[in-house]
Amino acid sequence: MKQDTGLLRTQKRRENEGRGNHASYGGTEQDGGMEQGSEMKVETSVTEATLDTQEERQQWSTPTEFLLACITTSVGLGNVWRFPTTAFENGGGAFLIPYLLVLLFIGRPLYFLELVMGQFSSSGSVEVWRMVPAMKGIGYGQIIAAWSVVTYFSYLMGLTVFYLIVSFSEVLPWSVCDEAWADENCVDASFNYTSNSSASYQSSSEQYYFNFVLHFKADISDGIGLPDWRMTLCLLFSWSVIFLSLGWGVKSIGKVVYFTALFPYVVLVTLLVRGAMLPGATTGMLYYIFPQWRRLLDPGVWYAAVTQAFFSLSTGFGVICHLASYNNFFHDVYRDAWIISMADTLTSLLAGFTIFSILGNLAFQLDTNIEHVVRSGSGLAFVSYPEVLAKFEWVPQLFSVLFFLMMFTLCVGSIQNLTGSIITIITDQYPAKSKFAITFGICAANFLFSLTYATPGGQWIFTLVDYFGGSFIIFILAIFETVAITVVYGLKNVLRDVKFMLNKDLGIYWRFSWYFCPVALLAILIYNMLYLCLPTLEGKPLPEAAYACGWTLAAVAISMVPVCLITTLYQAKGETFIERLRSIFRPAENWGPRKEVHRREWEKLQCEEKQRK
């Protein structure tokens, strides 16, 4: 058969490119009843082979670097402080059921789809839309979403640097009440709580965080104030680290991920063992997994599950496509998708057990219920955890340093890859420009934007950007993305490209999931709009002007889709309006594999399919 001949040529090319290079970390594969008899080999040396008209593109030095970079991106702050809090607020163990289902039928399929499209085209999240030129605006919208998350992630990184530095003190500063920032309601780590204690008492770690670190402003009607000089220096240091890790492209990222991907597991396991030995730890862990089955009928739980899956896996931000674009064309991303998604889920569960074991100990010492010591958002990491660290009898400074060093590495991993995706988009558009200079410019701009969060009213801005930039925008762009790829470009074409690149026939699970994704996401979005709950801070609504800014941010990001559609239509070729309209919903002439040799084989396969029809 002609199709078999084309695929045999591709397989021979795949094997030839694998010879003489480093071995892949994988072995034999089996998918849908089809076995691959020989070990998949991938190109791992940094080769620069592109179309004659395109700039050279770097590749990962080893496949392990790519895998660890993806793990670093997907396993981050969302797993350490966002997942346990979300699970706690949405039914404990019952939340795990919708979360795992969402991960199985939405998160993982979309993750694999972005990996495939990025590797197949060797392009970032804008240039990849040569497959459907009309939807190029999705990539630009993802830039705004990624930038939003990067700005407040970098602020969390600055907070982490601050706490890491003060952790080297002889006495942890939040373990005692200092008159410089504490009031008469402050109680330190040695205070003997009883059930008759006044509800107005606040822990020293809480007052230290809000009064000394944040200089928290409860009312921003007169403005958010000026940036704190200490946090400004911490942010400057943070962005210097990010710049150094990005300045030399994917090769520098590849070296950093060996540490940023593995170190958090060492710390989490260490702290879990230590936390499990504390009084009350078992109660905390049981509370974490205890199911409230009635919550399964609450649509809000499913909305939270999708939000967590997207935030955790980093799908919809363009970063996954960016990372995969530096792969060898025949690299087995099918295997990576399963490994990364499983690592993400297990890390979330590990972080949950770690944190709730310590929160259980805190509830035991305070003689109160766990719900009274859990604080959502940044409070979980910078109030509850430091408070318990201060109660460790054996070298609390050591555990504090380990924890905040872990937080720092998580921030580095998440920020460098999200920022890298933005850099890739710009360098793809302007290949003649210096990548080093572009990286410096983006890091400097992000540093200036992140200063907004270092103001006394910064927590209000943090809450606003997290809601609109980190969740709402991504929901809508993800719907556009899945419809554009599976419906407009066509699921049949996606399956053909996967077969050509990976030599795999995908089964019913992938076909069903890719059709199910946009339907499920649209249903959740409609529910969210019908029962809209705008973000609040400590139960207080934000000013109307702040909500207006949030909606403006969302509108700008989403409007990239129709604006780019109209621009592309205006530039399209064709004698009539209908011809031009049809052309922008078909793959562009330069769509396909980046290497000339792969493109020719792919085009031959397309011709053989047409002749067979």
Image (cartoon, rainbow, N blue to C red):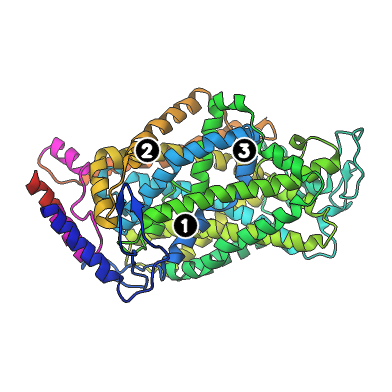
- Residue 116 shown left or right of residue 73 in the figure: left
Q: Is residue 442 visible?
A: no
Tag 1 secondary structure? helix
Q: Neighbour class for label 2 at 10 Å: few (<14), some, many (≥20)?
A: some
Q: Which residue is mark 2?
A: 513
The percent position of residue 388, horizontal first and vertical second, equals 79, 50
As displayed, is residue 30 above or below residue 251? above
Q: Which mark is residue 297?
A: none
Q: Amino acid at mark 3?
A: Ala
As displayed, is residue 512 above or below residue 112? above
| Marks 3 and 2 in Cβ contact (< 8 Å) | no
Residue in front for this viewpoint, 233 or 265: 265
- Residue 189 shown left or right of residue 136 in the figure: right
Q: Which residues are magenta?
A: 576-605
Q: Which residue is mark 1?
A: 70
Instruction: Identify the residue at horizontal 76%, vertical 63% (top origin).
Output: 398
Marks 3 and 2, how far apart in space? 24 Å
The percent position of residue 224, horizontal first and vertical second, equals 66, 44
